Image (spheres, grey):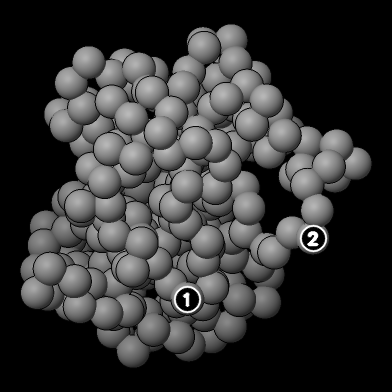
Amino acid sequence: MQCKEIIEIIEENYPKEAALTFDNVGLQAGRSTKKVSKILLALDATTPVIELAEKQDVDMLITHHPLIFSPLKSITDQDFVGRRILRLIQDDIAYYAMHTNYDVLGMAELSEEILQLKETEVLDVTGEFFGISQGIGRVGLLESTMSLRSFCDYVKEKLVLSNIKVFGDLDKEIKKVAISPGSGKSEIAVALKHNVDVLVTGDIGHHEGLDAMEQGLAIIDAGHYGTEYIFVDDMKKYLSQRCPGVEIITEPVSYPFQVV
């Protein structure tokens, strides 16, 4: 298959038009006519991921987070972003990013399923796609009420995490849940409007956590990586079903930081 054919398959269900206005998604480096027999899926186009792509002799790298996010004035080996772009081009690896378009049309529903939420609705509507309202995150109900302490254990089990941060009274009863994978500090105000008991997300700072608690909202910070690495296996299933003859490999789960 050619790279452009794989892009068509991706954008059939995750069109670029679903991405938020600040985002940069799509083919970011390489040839659309590149013949693709092997794809590597990863969350980020880090140097170790590109090294893995080289070692595995892949033809196309697909990540969730875009390597090129802010406008670039030059692409040289004098810049840490430029060096990676040059490496991909020199190795003839086509590079594609699917970020907030996947957040809206894939990640939100996937996270809902992982937490097994009931009676769900979109947390933050961003538009209408395929005839229904879509957007960032989900709001839903747990099967039964549990304490915040027990819900923390539940989140760790469902997302396969060894640790999380939590803001709130651990004895608080939890029934209505919001989840916004990735960086969710901007979703705190939206979650409050939905009258949820807890928001599960990542990248919550000291002040955001304190302010949320003052307004009666508990927050579980399960990490940016911890709430989004689910993208990799989900897209492997998606592409494996639609790209016969193309081998799909994935980046091993590898958290970008250590707790010591």
**SS under mark 1:** loop
Considering every residue shown, the one lying at the far front of the view is 33
Residue 67 placement, left or right of 75:
left
With respect to residue 231, does 73 lie above or below?
below
Q: Residue at x 12, y 68 (%)?
A: 130
Q: Quadrant of the C terminus?
A: top right
Residue linked to disc 1: 21
* Relative depth, front residue between 143 and 246: 246
Badge 2 is on which residue? 73
Residue 228 is situated, as x and y percent measured from the top left of the image, at: 43, 47
| Nearest the eye: 45 or 212 | 45
Q: Which mark is first along the chain, 2 or 1?
A: 1
As displayed, is residue 74 above or below residue 214?
Answer: above
Question: Seen in the image, is 222 located left or right of residue 245?
Answer: right
Residue 258 appears anywhere in the view: no
Residue found at x 49% / y 36% = 31
Image quarter where the N terminus lies is: top left
Q: Residue at x 47, y 47 (%)?
A: 27
- Where is residue 60 shown, x and y percent of the image? 46, 28
Q: Position of residue 225 (x, y in %)?
A: 52, 44
Residue 175 in view: yes
Residue kind at label 2, given as amino acid type: Lys
Asked if labels 2 and 1 touch by Cβ distance under 8 angstroms, the answer is no
Q: Residue furthest right?
A: 78
Dot 2 falls on a residue whose secondary structure is: loop
Of badges 1 and 2, the one in the foreground is 2
Is the residue 55 above or below the residue 180 in the image? above
- Location of residue 152 with respect to 156 vertically, above or below: below
Q: Nearer the viewer, residue 84 or 147?
A: 84
